[in-house]
Image (cartoon, grey):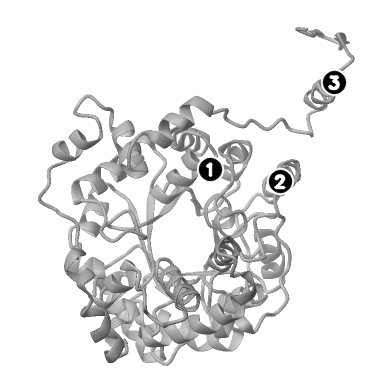
């Protein structure tokens, strides 16, 4: 029995442990080995949100990163987290024409072969974006539809059976069980996975979990026993912690259960060792095994969201009230009808809870996203039909409701949108980057200050020697003689 592996290192591993801060230079160092390591799929960070992060924080060009990944990884299916409106955090998304242009550009570059559609927005696709999946098919993209796992009175076996049937009817290439909070237990996977396999109409089911509660690896092994044949894993040190299980650990343990693989473990171990070197060089956190944390089942806040919450509370001088915010999060989620605590819902719930605590009066201020939630913008999947009716009435009576559009303007032409960002002479790449960044200011700053980070391998003796010599301020001239070469280094000063 053979198991296939989806690698999440560059995208979800980096997002979970480094706030999506993996420099393109690190990816470049590892890309060739991962491409030839035998993974079924490699996730790549080419969502607009990743573009923003790369421009704003890393001061690098995301289009150059995309081209590099396409060039370095020609053999493996490359996937990203897709969304028909492109921007999952915004009140309305991009017009259809912009979305299609962005996808086509990624396909033309060669950095996109599969789209993993974000969890529990299926109703939105069916109702509001009927063009989306046919468009993906027209671009010869594989389609993976997610079913998000969570714990609530609403998310029963019947719910998951029905959701699996709905998704199977859309005929994706793959269905994947997405456990963003790491909430699955061995007992729950024993009831849930057989139910999904039974209702999937023969479509393969992948399993994606996080190590947040310390249970993901044993859940994966149980999933294999139950019939799963594809798992989402990551390469250490961007594994474990709040990320996915380590591919090296899962493969080793799966072997004892009789499961084989086609992975080149030597290549993966090299990539892991190299990533450890680069992570230590940049003083980045290293993923490690997580102790069991039962609070995760109460708050259900993903690791990346809670770390951002702590940062925001410090900025507001409310860091000593985090326990109040966590308790309020539970209450807000219940009142909203138990949305899955996954992007974008987890951010909405936590933000509203923090505002409730900060103002001292619940829902005195309501963020636009919660208004949009009450309006039903996110479809039945969000849980708004279970929303507390008194709260819904209160929110929908706010004057702000009339000012919030419920959907993007699909009638506006892409030519008119281009005029807002520089006109018809702009290249597609430049236009899309300006659209994503909402103008040129941060792009111009990037181009003034950009210095793409390159990583010299410490395992290469000559490179290491030159690196060490460069750190010696008193050396003026150095002559290096080898058996078949000579190298002279001279100081410019």
Residue 172 seen in render: yes
Residues at marks 2 and 3, CA–CA distance in whole angstroms: 22 Å
Q: Is residue 275 left or right of residue 45?
A: right
Of badges 2 and 1, the one in the foreground is: 1
* Residue drawn at point x = 31 percent, y = 84 percent: 162
Direction right: furthest residue: 474
Residue 184 seen in render: no
Q: Is residue 322 left or right of residue 401?
A: right
Q: Position of residue 295 (x, y in %)?
A: 62, 83
**Residue beneath disc 3:** 469
How crowded pointer 1 is (Cα within 10 Å; few <14, some 14-19, many 20+) is rated as: few
Q: Work out whether mark 2 precedes mark 1 in sequence or the reverse, and give the earlier one.
A: 1
Q: Position of residue 387 (x, y in %)?
A: 31, 86
The quadrant in which residue 383 appears is bottom left
Q: Position of residue 68 (x, y in %)?
A: 49, 33
How crowded pointer 3 is (Cα within 10 Å; few <14, some 14-19, many 20+) is rated as: some
CB under 8 Å between discs 2 and 3: no
CB under 8 Å between discs 1 and 3: no
* Residue drawn at point x = 37 percent, y = 35 percent: 109
Q: Quadrant of the C terminus?
A: top right
Q: Which mark is residue 252?
A: none
Q: Nearer the viewer, residue 335 or 278?
A: 335
Q: Quadrant of the N terminus?
A: bottom right
**Residue beneath disc 1:** 57
Direction left: furthest residue: 411
Q: Nearer the viewer, residue 364 or 5?
A: 364
Residues at marks 2 and 1, CA–CA distance in whole angstroms: 17 Å
Q: Which mark is residue 279?
A: 2
Q: Work out whether mark 2 precedes mark 3 in sequence or the reverse, and give the earlier one.
A: 2
Residues at marks 1 and 3, CA–CA distance in whole angstroms: 30 Å
**Secondary structure of residue under mark 2:** helix
């Amino acid at each position: 029995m053979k198991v296939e592996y989806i690698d999440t290192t560059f995208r979800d591993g980096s997002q979970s442990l480094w706030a999506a801060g993996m420099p393109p230079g690190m990816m470049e160092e590892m890309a060739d080995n991962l491409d030839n390591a035998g993974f079924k799929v490699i996730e790549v960070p080419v969502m607009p949100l990743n573009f923003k992060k790369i421009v704003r924080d890393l001061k690098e060009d995301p289009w150059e990163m995309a081209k590099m990944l396409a060039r370095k990884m020609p053999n493996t299916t490359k996937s990203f987290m897709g969304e028909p409106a492109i921007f999952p955090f915004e009140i309305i998304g991009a017009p259809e024409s912009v979305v299609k242009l962005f996808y086509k550009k990624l396909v033309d570059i060669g950095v996109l072969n599969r789209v993993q559609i974000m969890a529990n927005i299926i109703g939105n696709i069916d109702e509001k974006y009927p063009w989306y999946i046919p468009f993906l098919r027209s671009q010869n993209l594989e389609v993976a539809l997610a079913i998000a796992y969570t714990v609530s009175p609403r998310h029963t076996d019947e719910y998951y059976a029905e959701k699996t049937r709905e998704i199977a009817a859309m005929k994706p290439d793959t269905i994947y069980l997405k456990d963003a909070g790491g909430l699955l237990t061995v007992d729950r996977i024993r009831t849930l996975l057989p139910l999904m396999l039974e209702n999937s109409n023969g479509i393969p089911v992948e399993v994606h979990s996080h190590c947040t509660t310390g249970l993901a690896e044993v859940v994966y092994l149980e999933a294999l026993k139950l019939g799963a044949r594809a798992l989402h894993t990551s390469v250490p040190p961007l594994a474990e912690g709040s990320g996915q299980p380590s591919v090296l650990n899962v493969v080793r343990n799966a072997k004892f259960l009789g499961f084989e693989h086609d992975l080149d473990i030597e290549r993966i171990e090299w990539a892991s060792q190299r990533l450890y070197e680069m992570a230590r060089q940049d003083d980045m956190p290293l993923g490690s095994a997580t102790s069991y944390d039962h609070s995760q089942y109460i708050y259900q806040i993903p690791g990346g969201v809670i770390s951002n919450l702590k940062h925001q509370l410090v900025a507001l001088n409310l860091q000593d009230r985090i326990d109040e915010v966590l308790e309020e999060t539970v209450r807000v989620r219940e009142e909203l009808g138990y949305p899955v605590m996954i992007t974008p819902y987890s951010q909405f719930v936590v933000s509203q809870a923090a505002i409730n605590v900060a103002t001292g009066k619940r829902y005195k201020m309501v963020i636009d996203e919660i208004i949009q939630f009450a309006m039903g913008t996110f479809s039945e999947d969000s849980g708004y039909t279970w929303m507390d009716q008194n709260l819904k009435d209160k929110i929908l009576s706010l004057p702000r409701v009339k000012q919030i559009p419920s959907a993007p303007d699909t009638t506006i032409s892409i030519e008119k949108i281009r005029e807002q960002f520089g006109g018809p002479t702009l290249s597609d790449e430049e236009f899309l980057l300006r659209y994503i960044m909402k103008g040129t200011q941060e792009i111009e700053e990037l181009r003034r200050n950009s210095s793409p980070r390159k990583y010299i391998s410490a395992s290469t003796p000559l490179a290491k020697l030159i690196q060490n010599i460069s750190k010696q301020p008193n050396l003026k001239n150095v002559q290096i003689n080898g058996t078949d070469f000579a190298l002279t280094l001279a100081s410019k000063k």
